[in-house]
């Protein structure tokens, strides 16, 4: 596989290294301001070179990667991971959520005793 020389569009690169599921999603994220290259807001046609830092905001976490290798075509996950250096902060620990009371379908409304038990479970 031949690597492109020089520069690559940021929307094509982020899609090729699997930061976005589709190229159009990568372009839309750039237009919405969710992608930054070296701290500057990036348009889809912004060029990236090896050594550039790309920050992608979206979903629950922020991805912070440094371009190691230029790609234009989408590649396998192993090759994609080798194409950037991941400097993303660790994800926040997930909160423990109490299991909500589950009633059988068609069991009717809960009784007063069951409602009190549900309120205790929810911490009210």
Image (cartoon, grey):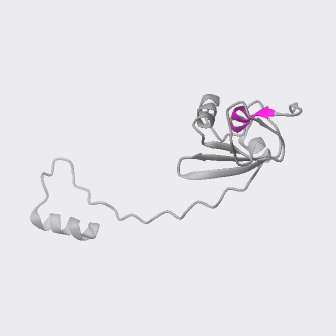
> For this rendering, which residue is in front, 61 or 28?
28
Residue appearing at x 70%, y 38% in the figure: 14
Can you tell which quarter of the image residue 113 is in? bottom left
Q: Work out which quarter of the rendered image holds the C terminus and state it.
A: bottom left
> For this rendering, which residue is in front, 103 or 25?
25
Look at the image and say whether residue 105 sits in the magenta stretch.
Answer: no
Q: Which residue of the protein is positioned furthest toward the front in this rendering?
A: 40
95 is higher (above) or lower (below) than 12: below
Q: Work out which quarter of the rendered image holds the N terminus and state it.
A: top right
Left or right of 22? Residue 59 is: left
Percent position (x, y) of residue 88?
67, 56
Percent position (x, y) of residue 77?
71, 42
> For this rendering, which residue is in front, 10 or 85?
10
112 is higher (above) or lower (below) than 79: below
Q: Which residues are magenta?
A: 8-14
28 is higher (above) or lower (below) than 110: above
Left or right of 112? Residue 59 is: right
């Amino acid at each position: 596989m031949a690597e492109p020389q020089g520069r690559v569009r940021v929307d094509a690169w982020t899609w090729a290294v699997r930061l976005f599921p589709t190229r159009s999603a990568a372009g839309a994220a750039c237009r919405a301001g969710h992608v930054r290259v070296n701290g500057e807001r990036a348009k889809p046609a912004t060029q990236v070179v090896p050594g550039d830092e790309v920050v992608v905001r979206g979903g629950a976490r922020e991805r912070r990667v440094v371009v190691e290798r230029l790609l234009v075509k989408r590649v396998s996950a192993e090759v994609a991971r080798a194409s950037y250096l991941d400097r993303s902060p660790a994800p926040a620990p997930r909160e423990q959520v109490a299991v909500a009371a589950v009633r059988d379908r068609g069991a009717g409304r809960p009784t007063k005793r069951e409602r009190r038990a549900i309120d205790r479970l929810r911490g009210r």
